Image (cartoon, rainbow, N blue to C red):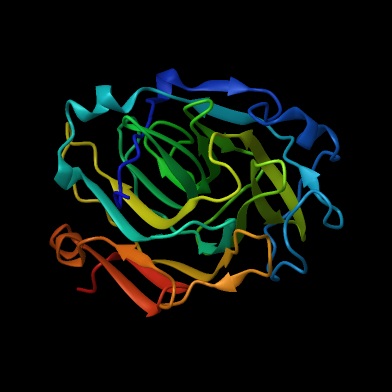
Amino acid sequence: MKFRSVARWCALAGLVTVLGPADPAVSHHRDRLPKCPRGEASVTAPTEPAGRYSRRACRAAGPVLESGVRLDRMRERATPSGYHHLGAGTGGEWGGVSGRVAIVDGAVRRNTYDFVAARFMVKRDLGAGSIAWLEAGWAETGWAGAGRQHIYTFNTNTKTWQFYDQYQLKPGDKVWLDLRTDADNVWQAWLWWNNRWNLLTAQQLPVGSRAYVEQYVEVHVDSSKPARLVVPPVTVDNVRLRPPDGGTARYWRDDVDTQIGDLAQQRAGGFCLNWVTRYDTWTAGDCPR
């Protein structure tokens, strides 16, 4: 399996469409849940696993910004040095991933292809250059949200970013996320918010009941407008992998078959990845000065 081979989509501010309630989901999963009320970021850890049968589970119901432009158009003016991936991926397949991610201000420039994102992903290589995946996390982009940080998802059914304005983030917040699938192989992205699990999206992807997992901080600098992005270190912790058989989640430790990128190349780009505990607690961002 290639360590990093997914294609990406992206859009400028003029190409962002405002949608109603979060539509890009498998409807029967969402329709069974009440709408999530507005609330504050949770400051306590989840009290039970994510899932539509967890107590007070609900579905995201606020406005969603959706944007998408094929990455091959962006790649024409991008260089490998403009794209940085800091994190790790599994060498084997799992039934899901969860963890906590800190929010920072990435000083992204407006009306550019700059972005900073911290996210979890589940994916499968379908062959012939095609990959199916679902990712969830937070992102700060130059084309949506006027430099604010947003909860977001991306999936290869819609091939678009979905930004969830219902959840108001600020630097210093920490959010819990959970990507998983049930027996029906529908992959779900959950956010622990207002002390309840909020379903962001549920997608019937050609992935099956298990997938390769990634945990990353990503930074992209618009190569048509070279600049240095300042990214305070993002902390990711409490990362757990869900066994393919649906058993109890376990910490992502160094006994898990894990692939990491070229740390020397990351440092050359001005970013450092620090494994506090391999691989469930780590930081990524600007190198210490």
Measuring from the top left, give residue 276's x and y in whole percent.
39, 80
Q: Is residue 35 above or below residue 289?
A: above
Residue 246 falls left or right of residue 127: right
Name the foreground residue: 229 vs 3: 3
Measuring from the top left, give residue 53's x and y in whole percent.
84, 52
Measuring from the top left, give residue 168's x and y in whole percent.
62, 48
Residue at the outermost bottom position: 277
| Residue 240 visible somewhere in the drawing | yes
Residue drawn where x is 68% and y is 66% of the image: 247
Task: Please state the total of marks drawn on the protein image.
Answer: 0
Quadrant of the drawing holding the C terminus? bottom left
Measuring from the top left, give residue 10's x and y in whole percent.
38, 30
Residue drawn where x is 86% and y is 37% of the image: 32
Q: Is residue 82 above or below residue 93?
A: above
Q: Is residue 9 above or below residue 185?
A: above
Residue drawn where x is 59% and y is 73% of the image: 250
| Residue 173 visible somewhere in the drawing | no
Q: Quadrant of residue 216?
A: bottom left
Q: Quadrant of residue 153?
A: top right
Residue 53 falls left or right of residue 210: right
Residue 65 falls left or right of residue 72: right
Name the foreground residue: 266 vs 175: 266
